[in-house]
Image: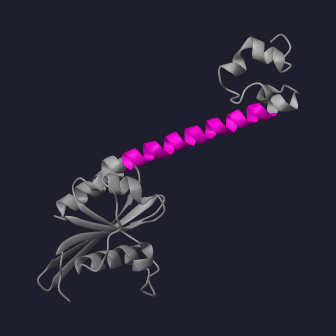
Amino acid sequence: MEVVYSRCAGLDVHKKTVVACVLIREGAQVQKEIRTFSIMTSDLLVLHDWLLAHGVREVAMESTGIYWKPIFNLLEASFRVLLVNAAHIKAVPGRKTDVKDCEWIAELLSYGLLKASFIPPKPIRELRDLTRYRKSLIDERVREVNRLHKLLESANIKLSSVATDVMGKLSVNPVATRKCGVPGG
C-alpha cells in the first residue's frame, strides 16, 4: 500500500484523556511515539505543541460523543483534522486498548484510508450553537408561561377568557384582571 501521509497522528479521545500516537515513516523505517494527555486546556496545548514539534500536519480522531469538540477546536487552526465515525474504525477485531486504538487510527490515516465526517466551518458551528441556545430559551419561556397559565386557572383566575396571551399587555391591564376575577385587580 502506498503511504499518503508520512507524518501523521491518531488520537483516541475519552472523557478525561486523549491518547495520541505520532507515526513517522521515513523510507522503510517507521517510528511511533505515544503519549497520554488530560483534556484540560493546558495539556491540550502541550499536545498541540508536541504534534507541531514532530512535524505532523494531519491528525485523525474518532467522533466520541461530544469529547472531540474541544480538541478539534484547538487543533483545527494548525492541522488538517479528520473527525472519523467510530464505526468505520472499530471494524477491526482484537483492538482493546487505547494505545492500540490510536496506533490503528494513525496507521489508517497514513495510508489515506479514513473518510472524514463533515464538520461545518467555525462561524457556522458557532451560529448553530447560538441558535440552539436561543431555541432552548424560547422553549423554556413557553414552559414557564404554561405553568403560570395553569397556576392562574387552578386559582380560579380565568385570564384566558379576556386575553389570548397570558403575558400580553391586556393580561396586566387592571380592568381586564378585574373582569376575570383577580381581587384588587
Which quarter of the rendering shows the C terminus? Answer: top right
The quarter in which the N terminus is drawn is bottom left
Q: Residue furthest top?
A: 184
The residue under the point 44% across, 42% down is: 130
Q: Is residue 13 magenta?
A: no
Nearest the viewer among 131 and 49 is 131
Residue 152 quadrant = top right
- Left or right: residue 125 compared with residue 106: right
Magenta region, main secondary structure: helix
Residue at horizontal 37 percent and vertical 50 percent from the top? 125
Q: Position of residue 31 (x, y in %)?
A: 21, 77
Q: Which residues are magenta?
A: 125-150
Residue 85 visible: yes
Q: Is residue 133 a member of the stretch shown in magenta?
A: yes
Which residue sits furthest left? 27
Among the 4 quarters of the image, the one containing residue 82? bottom left
Q: For the point 38% across and 46% down, which residue is it?
A: 126
Left or right placement of residue 133 versus residue 154 in this view: left
x and y percentages locating residue 7 in the rendered image = 18, 71
Pick whichever, 99 or 184, lies toward us.
184
Left or right of residue 21: residue 31: left
Asked whether residue 21 appears in the rendered view, the answer is no
| Vertical placement of residue 120 versus 113, above or below | above
